[in-house]
Amino acid sequence: MKFLIVISLLLCSCGASVEQMVDKVLHGKITGIEDPRTGCNTHPELVPYIRDFEEEYGRGIGDIPICVGDRLYPANMEEPLNTVGVCLKWTSPIRIYKAIIVRTSWFNDNKHDRYAMRQLIEHELGHCALNRVHNSKVDANGKQVSIMFPISFSGQHYRDNHQYYLDELFNRL
Ligand SMILES: [Zn+2]
């Protein structure tokens, strides 16, 4: 199959909004944001995908809980309803705390789809563990060049090209 079929146009995450938020937090312009890890405990069904990522990464992701929840953004920010996952970063004077939240409805619909789950976890850990930003580029065939594409794409295309996307994510091309 040469052209991908986009089966989902769910926004995959954060990007500009969270980058803006992090920028504002770093500059002290937003107050009242709690440590995003508060109440966020890694969901047991996500652990295998985290382990897959760590195996490719060659190290642990550290203290980045990945939880499932109904709300992605802090209470004092507008919730992006078409977003299915987010990497949140919160700064203190001495360090940055991080957490990933996966939307409950998306998780329930996709938890048996191994490649949909891997796509989301690799994308969000691309933000949170690798500090990658979004990449909206497509190639001559209209295919996404990176897992950091801001919108989730066909699981079939992702599965057929998984090694490529891993190599791109971990800068091994
Ligand atoms: Zn993203």
Image (cartoon, grey):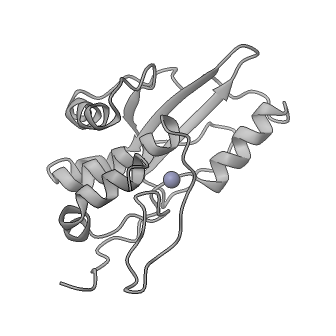
Residue 4 vs residue 130: left or right? left
Q: Quick one: quadrant of the C terminus?
A: bottom left
Residue 146 vs residue 33: left or right? left
Q: Residue furthest front?
A: 173
Residue depicted at 65% across the width and 28% down the height:
90
Q: Quadrant of residue 165?
A: bottom left
Q: Quick one: quadrant of the N terminus?
A: bottom left
Q: Quadrant of residue 140?
A: bottom left
Judge by depth and name the residue closer to the eye, 98 or 60: 60
Res. 109 in view: no
Whether 91 is drawn above or below 130: the answer is above
Whether 17 is drawn above or below 101: the answer is below
Q: Residue furthest top?
A: 94
Residue 16 vs residue 52: left or right? right
Res. 49 in view: yes
Whether 47 is drawn above or below 24: the answer is above
Judge by depth and name the residue closer to the eye, 107 or 53: 53
Judge by depth and name the residue closer to the eye, 139 or 104: 139
Whether 102 is drawn above or below 30: the answer is below
Provide residue 101's location: percent of width, then percent of height: 44, 38
Provide residue 11's location: percent of width, then percent of height: 47, 62
Provide residue 98's location: percent of width, then percent of height: 54, 28
Residue 36 vs residue 90: left or right? left
Provide residue 83's location: percent of width, then percent of height: 48, 56
Residue depicted at 46% across the width and 36% down the height:
100
How many tags in the picture?
0
Residue depicted at 84% across the width and 30% down the height:
28
